[in-house]
Amino acid sequence: MYKISELYDLDHTLAKDYLAQFEYPWQALAGIKELILELGKNLGEDYVEVKEHVWVHKTAHVFESAYLGAPCIIGPKTEVRHCAFVRGSALVGANCVVGNSVELKNCILFDNVETPHYNYVGDSILGYHSHLGAGGITSNLKSARDNIILRRKDENYNVVEEFETGLRKIGAFMGDYVEVGCNSVLCPGTIIGPHTNVYPLSRVRGQIAANSIFKDATHVTLKD
């Protein structure tokens, strides 16, 4: 079960001090809205409050057809492209891409994150230099609509530990330098360790080891 300290280099997000309070990433989801509102008070003159509780860095490029819902922060040199839909409670770092028809909701994108084409990112945290391929989504709600329980399994896929999150909506937690292939679905509560690559058209659930290649649930290999 990956902890925040094992997934992320916190020097690459304005949420550094906030995230450092928690052991596991899902514990940070409930306070993202309040975090953004607090950060917004002290962003300085390089940010412009384009409307109430929506702060955009002067070097960011937000296309006219994009929608920015409050509260949100768009970092330096980030692009928010045509028809992007930021529903709110989105903290987007520096040098990011929020592509055409991408939807963000209650999430943290570290610096240099790319969500370039037709992605949904909800109730999720995407680490430094992570990339969600075209059509990739973070599924954040079970079909049964009950609270999400995260389970840690051993090498034989036996459950050895359970975490009662108390949350009905949890998306995915992608560590630093994670690459997710096109049209992949990250099931609710998925945690992907740093420097891992996920094949296109994958259905990913549970915890995926760092420095690995995910082809499917029974074919996960460590990189050389």
Image: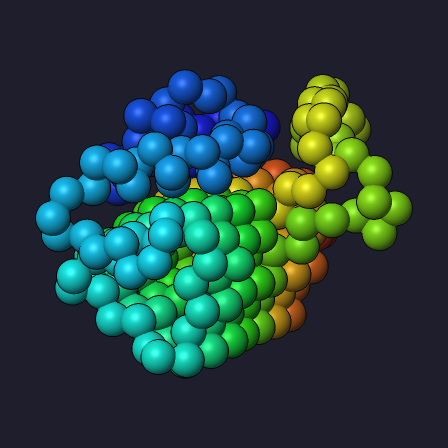
Task: Residue 125: give x, y in percent of width and height.
Answer: 47, 44
Left or right: 65, with 59 as reference point: right
Q: Residue at x 46, y 58 (%)?
A: 69
The one nearer the camera, 204 or 85, is: 85
Can you say which quadrant of the picture contains the N terminus?
A: top right
Left or right: 72, with 182 as reference point: left
Q: Residue at x 54, y 35 (%)?
A: 29
The total number of labels drawn is 0
Residue 191 appears anywhere in the view? yes
- Coloring scheme of the render? rainbow
Left or right: 166, with 8 as reference point: right
Task: Residue 200: give x, y in percent of width and height.
Answer: 58, 69
The one nearer the camera, 48 or 146, is: 48
Task: Residue 88: give x, y in percent of width and height.
Answer: 49, 53
Depicted 182 relative to depicted 96: above or below: below
Task: Residue 40: give x, y in percent of width and height.
Answer: 29, 41
| Quarter of the view holding residue 18 | top left
Q: Residue at x 78, y 28 (%)?
A: 158
